[in-house]
Amino acid sequence: MKEKEEKLGLWLLVFVALGSMIGSGIFNSPKDLIAVANPQGTMITWLVGGFGALMLALL
């Protein structure tokens, strides 16, 4: 019996690369945000974003 050998398709590789590029933005965003915003605005933004992420995780 022959088993089909699974290969990575073009679209899978494109989306993996795209996800890696978008995901790496989390490491650059805080530096850029702190440079232009005041500390209170930065803290409020992080709290709202963290709360939203928590709500999506619990959904």
Image (cartoon, rainbow, N blue to C red):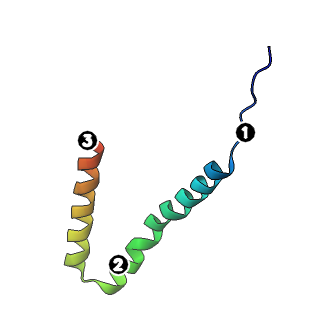
Q: In front: mark 2 or mark 1?
A: 1
Q: Residue at x 24, y 79 (%)?
A: 39
CA separation in Å, label 1 and label 3: 34 Å
Residue corresponding to mark 3:
58
Asked if the residues shown at circle 1 and circle 3 are in contact, with their CB atoms under 8 angstroms apart, the answer is no
Q: Which of the two discs, 3 and 2, labels the residue nearer the N terminus?
A: 2
Q: Nearer the viewer, residue 28 or 11?
A: 11
Question: Could you tell me which quadrant the C terminus lies in?
Answer: top left
Q: Residue at x 49, y 60 (%)?
A: 23
Q: In front: mark 3 or mark 2?
A: 3
Q: Is residue 3 left or right of residue 41?
A: right
> For the residue marked with disc 2, what is the amino acid?
Leu
Q: Which of the two discs, 1 and 3, labels the residue nearer the N terminus?
A: 1
> For the residue marked with disc 3, what is the amino acid?
Leu
Q: Position of residue 57 (x, y in %)?
A: 30, 44
- Would you call the spot at circle 3 few (<14 residues within 10 Å), some (14-19), or many (20 or more)? few
Relative to 40, say whether 59 is above or below: above
